Amino acid sequence: MRITIIGTGYVGLVTGACFAEAGHQVICVDCDAAKISLLKAGGIPIYEPGLAELVKKNVDEDRLGFTTHTKEGVERSDVIFIAVPTPPLPDGAVDLSFIEGVARDIAGAMTSYKIVVDKSTVPVKTGEKVGETIKRYCKAKVEFDVVSNPEFLREGFAVEDFMRPDRVVVGVSSQRPVQAMKEVFAPYNAPIIVTDLNSAESIKHAANSCLALKISYINAISVICGAHRAPVSRRGAGLWRQLFPEGLERVHQNLGTTRLRLPAAQRSSTHQRRADGNVREENRRRPLGAQGKENRRARPGVQAEHG
Ligand SMILES: NC(=O)c1ccc[n+]([C@@H]2O[C@H](COP(=O)([O-])OP(=O)(O)OC[C@H]3O[C@@H](n4cnc5c(N)ncnc54)[C@H](O)[C@@H]3O)[C@@H](O)[C@H]2O)c1
């Protein structure tokens, strides 16, 4: 299928490269001209195992391209994914201005039926708002569908997670885009959960908060075990495997400790926010070395389903 990804950041670039690898024709759009120049010159703006090879291979085989022009991306594809940031505002609300801006840009460029898929993590009912925006700003008055397809990849394992998902969630408000969405994800052989727009958006928040719950729980157990000088790993390996099926070893490795606790700097309420991606925003504002790149790679085991 012909697919456009708007927002070539962590999620957008991984998604674009993995769709191209599956045989789709993909164009990645970003408003950051320096990033697009870098990608066009063969560079990669982020480190993610396997990503550079995947991008190079699919660019060489002519299935993956980059542009700064949203119009070009919209014209060339049938399915348009939105993967722009949704950072927190100072009052805790979500900044939806990137999504709103992209919805307007897509609307302005549409001249035929399109499927507009939101991959960014958004509050419930955002898909409905995106639909209203596109309807309002689409001068050509063509038909379209808005779909929600939340992303569950983990930084550090993004390519692996994308190529082997345990489920794909597709939220729709009509049956028309369902077949195309199934075709997009068919190469990955994963169960496709088709639901309504609001439910798909809710599923992402349920997954993120479940992760935060597991981390909080295991930290509490760790504190109790610590008080009795009983290493938590020896006391309940079976239980930990239920909580962290990716494996106890990997969690230990990622935390760099023999006890299942987040490092001191990440404890207290911070570890709750880690799970919904806010920590990443926080890290961006800190100098590299203190948190920055090291942190993005260091503890993916507890970062599962992030952003
Ligand atoms: N990073 C993760 O691990 C992860 C996982 C799941 C979900 N998410 C969610 O996915 C979304 C994207 O996250 P990310 O980590 O990829 O963000 P990111 O900041 O790495 O990338 C976003 C990209 O969008 C571009 N952009 C912004 N406005 C644009 C516009 N109007 N037109 C074109 N490009 C534009 C930016 O230049 C940037 O390159 C967020 O909602 C995030 O919460 C992230």
Image (spheres, helix red, strand yellow):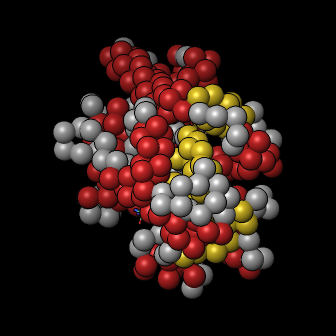
Task: Say which quadrant the N terminus sits in.
Answer: bottom right
The residue under the point 53% across, 26% down is 199
Count of picture labels: 0
In this view, the residue farthest toward the left is 91
> Residue 271 lies in what quarter of the image?
top left
Query: Residue reaching furthest bottom?
Result: 41
| Residue 87 appears in the figure | no
For ligand 1, the image quadrant comes to bottom left
Above or below, 216 against 88 in this view is above
What residue is shown at x 43% (from left), y 32% (from top)? 124
Query: Image point 56% across, 23% down: which residue?
Result: 243
Image location (x, y in percent) of residue 51:
63, 64
User: Looking at this view, is 229 or 27 the one in front?
Assistant: 27
Q: 265 and 72: which one is in front?
A: 72
Residue 285 lies in what quarter of the image?
bottom left
In the rendered image, the vertical position of residue 12 relative to residue 180, given as above or below: below
Residue 237: image location, x then y, percent: 59, 21
Position of 147 with respect to 93 (left or right) is right
Residue closest to the eye, 101 or 202: 101
Q: Which quadrant is the C terminus positioned in?
A: top left
Tell me where residue 70 appears, x and y as whole percent.
51, 69
* Along the line of sight, the residue nearer the viewer: 286 or 281: 281
Q: Please say whether residue 78 is visible from this viewpoint.
A: yes
Left or right: 88 as drawn, with respect to 28: left
Give the percent coordinates (x, y) of residue 7: 48, 62
User: Residue at coordinates 53% horizontally, 71% vertically from top-left?
Assistant: 71
Q: Quadrant of residue 212?
A: top left
